[in-house]
Amino acid sequence: MLEPVLNPLWVAIFLGELPGWWSMVGGVVVLGAVTAWGLLRARARVRVA
């Protein structure tokens, strides 16, 4: 699960190709949404248990 997140970093380090501004914004939005979903789901599990 960590590999897709780190792929842009590996490309930037080894090939010198930096992602564009909108790609970075999109990545932050996706990672933020997935993180929020995971936290809310974990919180809901604690309430049920």
Image (cartoon, rainbow, N blue to C red):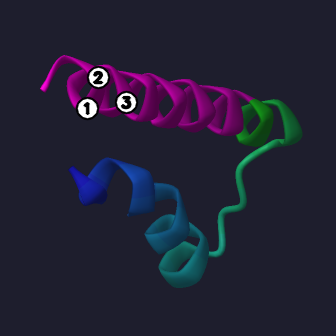
Secondary-structure class at tag 2: helix
Residue 30 falls left or right of residue 28: left
Secondary-structure class at tag 3: helix
Q: Position of residue 14 (x, y in %)?
A: 49, 82
Q: In the rendered image, which residue does mark 1 sit on? A: 46
Q: Position of residue 11 (x, y in %)?
A: 50, 66
Residue 22 falls left or right of residue 48: right
Amino acid type of the residue that numbered disc 3 sits on in the rendered structure: Arg
Q: In the rendered image, which residue does mark 2 sit on? A: 47
For this rendering, which residue is in front, 40 or 34? 40
Residue found at the very far left of the displayed protein: 49
User: Looking at the image, is mark 3 or mark 2 nearer the viewer?
Assistant: 2
Q: In the rendered image, which residue does mark 3 sit on? A: 43
Q: Position of residue 37 (x, y in %)?
A: 44, 22
Look at the image and give the residue range highlighted in magenta. 26-49
Residue 28 painted magenta: yes
Q: CA distance from mark 3 to mark 2?
A: 7 Å
Residue found at the very far bottom of the displayed protein: 14
Dots 3, 2 in contact, CB < 8 A: yes
